[in-house]
Amino acid sequence: MSLATIAYRVSSDPSFASLLQQSPDEVLQSIGIVLTEEERTALQKILDMPGMINDSLNHILKAEPWVYSA
């Protein structure tokens, strides 16, 4: 659920997305999200693709059933 929360925040809050790219550990700590090593690796891969962040996060969001119930 943590990655889905991050994906939602990035897709709905451009300033959060910008801060997350600059200092992901600090931003996640400030909102109380602790990622597993596997989740951290997945997030870092997304953050390393600046031109593709929106597309990657859309795929993450679409994997979550709650996205379709809104």
Image (cartoon, grey):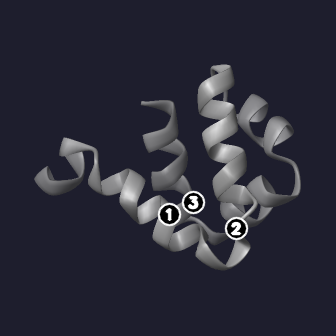
> Could you tell which of marks 3 and 1 lies nearer the N-terminus?
3
Q: Is residue 68 visible?
A: yes
Classify 10 Å Cα crowding around label 3: few (below 14), some (14-19), many (20 and above). Answer: many
Q: Which is more foreground, mark 3 or mark 2?
A: 2
Please name the amino acid that badge 1 sits on. Answer: Ser
Please name the amino acid that badge 3 sits on. Answer: Val
Classify 10 Å Cα crowding around label 1: few (below 14), some (14-19), many (20 and above). Answer: some
The x, y position of residue 6, in whole percent, is: 55, 46
Q: Is residue 18 left or right of residue 12?
A: right
For the residues bearing labels 2 and 1, Cβ distance under 8 angstroms:
yes
* Alpha carbon distance from label 3 to label 2: 14 Å
Relative to the observer, which residue lies in front, 56 or 17?
56
For the residues bearing labels 3 and 1, Cβ distance under 8 angstroms:
no
Residue furthest left as drawn: 69
Residue shown at 27%/44% (left/top)?
64
Residue at which label 3 appears: 10
Residue shown at 71%/58% (left/top)?
47
Residue at which label 2 appears: 49
The x, y position of residue 45, in whole percent, is: 68, 51
Mark 2 element type: loop
Mark 3 element type: helix
Q: Is residue 18 left or right of residue 68?
A: right
* Alpha carbon distance from label 2 to label 1: 9 Å
Q: Which is more foreground, mark 3 or mark 1?
A: 1
Residue at which label 1 appears: 56
Mark 1 element type: helix
The x, y position of residue 17, in whole percent, is: 68, 62
Classify 10 Å Cα crowding around label 2: few (below 14), some (14-19), many (20 and above). Answer: few
Relative to the observer, which residue lies in front, 15 or 68?
68
Quadrant assignment, res 50: bottom right
